[in-house]
Image (spheres, coloured by chain):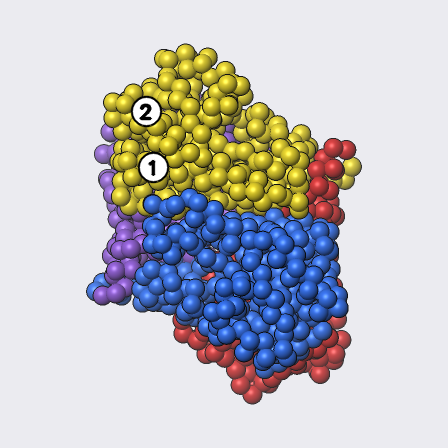
Chain colours: A purple, B yellow, C blue, D red
């Protein structure tokens, strides 16, 4: 149901690969709540994905390719978006992550550190690049809102999540640090949303994902949060109803993060 | 601006003393967003306050007195509210706190422990009483939402906050614990909102409140959050857009909680 | 192996019921490391326990009964201990906890709140009583060290731990709060040690303890910490090697607290 | 005073530049407590420093240069150390950090990302390289202990700490992640110690360090912890008395981390 919660707001959505993506649902929800959007992803992801379908759904939202490791391409994205919107940006969703070592099946105890640099660059430093460019171009409206998606592996070890946990810890720290500077100057808010494990194309790439999502389901009093509900939550964070929430890591996980054990898990232990 | 975000929802608001109260603003915002509400407070607070004015603003919302340390009075409140609403409750705001030792000017190193029991009973165990009654009466709708207001003194020491910090730590734990049980059975969510220091009648009673609110202002990249914005935030937590957020302590504080120091504070240190 | 790490130090040990108790091991280790000690427990626990055996092992350490809910008895304990030691106290172990509701098999959703008050009084406010008396009697030496035992249920929900989780959250907050005040005046340190579930007489009273300790074992990279190792850890905190550690909650749990899941658990989930 | 707490243990100390360095004090304390040590630092730091003096104090401890961004040099260090010790290693201190952007006076909102990669490589990924090599060479004894020094800027923003905060967040996550894997296989413990700001050569390079250390001093109930006490704390973590402590970030900071405000700061605010 639409409440026009984002009426008049303009935002950029990173990372909508296909209709399984959280970013896809966020784009749909933002549009449904009255926002105008620009879609972006890596050139290669745009070729693989079905983003034009999403664009059409969202009133022919522009699709602007950007390699997040390139300052030039990110700058181009911000410039083109502001041209399209005819002004500054209200909100940004950062839903970007890739682990080269995981793709190559290198376990955490046998990482290739060149790959690690690349993983950190794509998954975490991309947020710094983006915010630094926006800050210096003064591209985000006062009281604007930036959300980056993350995972609880940045707080506790989930062994199969491997180097992505390091990337997410870095991402969350960048979010806090830039949240300080952008908050001081422009009241721009920066937060991370730490979402339940979700059956997206990216998620499914994680080894042992099935056992793991099953564990999370049984460890969450409300069950795992799905992508649609995550999108709803992001909408609240982009809206004016959450103006003083910044520099936070916000768990959207059905209670997983503060559950030590559940009766269901205990019963499973006795099998 | 209303988005009818709470259209059709029914809630109970504890603790609206006067128009400085956060609960007062929450009641106004919930009503503006389409909710029906019931107001409640301690009998003595009702006599002191101006709650009838608020009731009138909110379509003559019933005002039902309840001493939060009495199971009978809380039970009566829940029963009367359900009668009035013609069904179960969607949301509850718990904004209740009082420190007898602070009233008596007993510092933290000279507490009267009988008073402490009373302070814990009013400020923290009241939430347990309320949730236990609601749970056993099955008074809250599935996916309902309960929010209790708290303060960061439950995580870090603010010496003048004294025994209220102990009460808030207990309150937050009760919120998590009951959030587990109520989440498992009815998907009911329970969260605490940890708000900036706010110039309410209750807040102003804290010794050294001025120096303290000034410090918080300078330590928050966005400045201290005010009561209106806190009310907006509570609205998002009562809405269906945050269905998988539970058992969390959510800072609504302009970034204070994750700021170690600011340039302004450093400059102040050099005076 | 003794390193005389506590040579010349004098301490009070609460809660040594029998040779399964963590406090029992702490007393033995402190004595082995050169400390003089006083033992204390509730009068009823002294009758049930075998504390005289421990006293003999520790050079006939005095056994002074004290009901921790009585200011008078705690005051007597401090006075008698200082008389015995011929001076102030260097360290204190608080290992005290009891849940009346758990004894009565009242689940968390059906607590008797009078019992809860009693549980909080014994398990948490006892630390405040003790520290307040010590503070006002100036009974602890500068740079002295106080340790209270706690459990991670104060951070995350373990449903069978029930109201003891609330008591531990309160205990930890009292520890931080008093750590501030006693630190400012006398450099006295106050910390909590959050120990793995341990097969003590108290632990075994928790419902579902077996499934639960088994889960913790599989979720801890080093396995559950035992009572002897906990005693060793307490020794380091009483020693002069940890002088600037205060107001902390310190996990002694084989890594449980920062492990999200282990391979062993995932395998168990697939059964 | 020596307690021979590390009698028979063999360890590697990274980062002793001069007698202001925390690592220098750790080396001295470990030696005083009976350990044999190997010293290491970057080749350029060895040229600048006075490490031979420290070596002589420590029974002519070998000084083995190693650039922490080079797998080959780290491998050589581990091999040479094991040759010297005639066996595996018991403990390692990682005290390594450098921010190229800070050296170049680039603020956090104008980072050169190539420099950031270099800073992360030196300050954080160096720990991963080291542990990965040790893991694959099986160079650390069962129940061995690794400590890396960090700073609270990884949890809260200290604006002048700039990109080093990102590096420390990454370091702490690597410590947790590798602590899991090394704990499972060899019971090796990995922890970080989060130390008060300290007047070392590295610390003094931080802009606004004086105002900042002054703030920390006034915000810590025990005052800022010094380097000697930090060394003592590291000794306890290398000893067998802390065998079940792993994957933790341990604050050694006089209570700063859990203090929200102090009376002294409030008074300063009123000036």
Q: Is residue D223 left or right of residue C108?
A: right
Residue C76 falls in image quadrant = bottom right
As helix, strand or loop, the secondary structure at mark 1 comes to helix
Q: Residue at x 50, y 64 (%)?
A: C44
Residue A245's label in the rendered image is none
Q: Which residue is mark 2?
A: B81
| Viewer-side residue, B80 vs D70 | B80
Which sits earlier in the primary sequence, circle 1 or circle 2? 2
Which of the pair A212/A138 is nearer the observer?
A212
- At x 61%, y 38%, the residue is B101
Q: Position of residue D42 (x, y in %)?
A: 63, 68
- Residue B156 placement (x, y as % from top left): 58, 45
Task: State the SS at label 2.
Answer: helix
Q: Nearer the viewer, residue D241 or D166?
A: D241
Subunit that carries the residue with mark 2: B
Front residue of C58 and C157: C58
Which subunit holds the residue at mark 1? Answer: B
Q: Quadrant of residue D65?
A: bottom right
């Amino acid at each position: 149901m639409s409440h026009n919660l984002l009426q008049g707001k303009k935002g950029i959505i990173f990372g909508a690969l296909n209709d399984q993506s959280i970013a896809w649902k966020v784009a749909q929800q933002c549009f449904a709540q009255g926002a105008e959007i620009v879609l972006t992803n890596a050139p290669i992801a745009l070729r693989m994905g079905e983003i034009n379908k999403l664009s059409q759904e969202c009133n022919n939202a522009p699709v602007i390719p950007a390699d997040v490791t390139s300052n030039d391409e990110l700058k181009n994205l911000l410039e083109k978006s502001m041209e399209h919107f005819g002004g500054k940006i209200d909100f940004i969703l950062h839903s970007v992550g890739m682990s080269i070592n995981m793709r190559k099946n290198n376990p955490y105890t046998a990482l290739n550190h060149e790959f690690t640099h690349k993983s950190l660059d794509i998954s975490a430093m991309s947020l710094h690049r983006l915010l630094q460019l926006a800050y210096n171009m003064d591209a985000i409206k006062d009281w604007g809102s930036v959300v980056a998606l993350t995972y609880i592996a940045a707080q506790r070890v989930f062994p199969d999540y491997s180097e992505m946990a390091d990337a997410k810890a870095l991402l969350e720290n960048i979010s806090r640090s830039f949240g300080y500077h952008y908050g001081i100057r422009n009241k721009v808010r920066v937060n991370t949303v730490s979402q339940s494990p979700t059956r997206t194309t990216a998620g499914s790439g994680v080894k042992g994902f099935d056992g793991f999502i099953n564990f999370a389901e049984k460890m969450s009093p409300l069950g795992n949060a799905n992508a649609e509900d995550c999108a709803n939550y992001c909408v609240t964070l982009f809206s004016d109803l959450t103006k003083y929430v910044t520099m936070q890591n916000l768990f959207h996980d059905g209670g997983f993060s503060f559950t030590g054990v559940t009766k269901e898990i205990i019963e499973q232990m006795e099998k």
